[in-house]
Image (cartoon, rainbow, N blue to C red):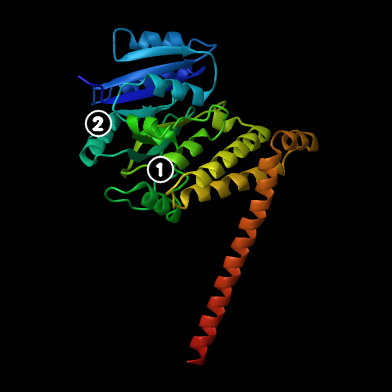
Amino acid sequence: MSIKISVIIPAYNIAPYLEDCLTGVLEQSFKDYEVIIVNDGSTDDSAEVAQALISGDDRFRIINIPHGGLSAARNTGIANAHGKYIYFLDGDDSIRKDTLQLLYSNAEANDLDVILFSACTFTDSINELKDSGEYRYNGHYEGVYSGSVLSDELVRNNDAHHCSSCMMMTRLDHLKENNLFFNEQLSYSEDSLMFIRLIPLSGRISVLDEPLYMRRYRNGSITTNTDNRTIINDMCTLYLDADAFINSTAGINTSLPLWYLELFITTIMKNHEQLSVKDSLVLRHAQPHALNMSVKRYKYFHSKRIALFMRSLLLYRLYSLFYRRK
């Protein structure tokens, strides 16, 4: 019988958290899955902990690779997956017991390329789930969307930032047919580039606004332990790749990539202000084109916002003047 879902779990020095993560998968109500744990050159006993937990269950396997980062680990998972759908689960987080069942049922019933969903959070010190709304959608998304329509809806409803690969399940063939892999140069915000490409290129997408994913906040994770220089360098790479995607992909007529392009540029500018002169010079030498173009486009976006604000203000004043005369 063919495998329905491939769950990819990158693991790098997360031994204390793997039991929670793998237990969450083992307790799924849906059973027709495979799990590929990619041990990304861990120097702790992550591989040993994982092996002890999955011993005797042939749905699980461990692939050991030299440390190459989250993107390399996920790409290794894609290359070795056999499921109809693929799901990326971070090894220090967990999922609800009905997550895979709900995702698979919705994907099959609606012939989906991608299904998006939401999350709740918890911290190491307080082991209590919190649904603060941070990872919930503002808009209401009913039915099935084309990628271009949903992209514009996400931007319009201020939901475009929900780009985590752990909050979506994708048809594996869809990734491979469109050559959608993670950029292994990135150590920060690698999900954004995948999201920019994946969503507009998808034919059928649904949004399930259920908190099926449980994200752990912990010290030492990539998202809480990244310096300004790394952020800027990765944002420059994201900027260049996003710009190339916008310019080279025929038929993409959506605001999502442009929204992210502006976000990357703004992030570059904000973090650049906090750099020392020495670090700034190093980055300018490494990413001259990206930084120069970012400055120009930042000024353009900024002036465009001012122009839109002034136009709105003028229209409001004309409207008020007209109705006072009446």
Q: Give the secondary structure at mark 1.
A: loop
Q: x%, y% of residue 238? A: 57, 38
Q: Residues within 10 Å of mark 2 (few under 14, many from 20)?
A: some
Residue occupying image coordinates x 54% and y 77%: 315
Residue nearer the viewer, 187 or 117: 187
Q: x%, y% of residue 122? A: 44, 33
Name the side, left or right, on which 267 lies relative to 84.
right
Using the numbered discs, state the Cα–Cα distance from disc 1 to disc 2 in whole angstroms.
22 Å
Name the side, left or right, on which 60 lies relative to 325.
left
Tell me if residue 235 can be seen: yes
Task: Check the image and report above or below for 128 versus 83.
Answer: below
Residue at the outermost right position: 277
Task: Check the image and report above or below for 56 versus 34.
Answer: above
Tell me if residue 129 can be seen: no
Read off the residue under disc 2: 101
The quarter holding residue 179 reads top left
Task: Check the image and report above or below for 317 versus 254.
Answer: below
Q: Identity of the amino acid at label 2?
A: Gln
Task: Quarter of the image for the N terminus: give it.
Answer: top left
Q: Identity of the amino acid at label 1?
A: Ile
Read off the residue under disc 1: 199
Residue occupying image coordinates x 47% and y 53%: 255
Q: x%, y% of residue 254? A: 44, 52
Task: Check the image and report above or below for 142 versus 228.
Answer: below
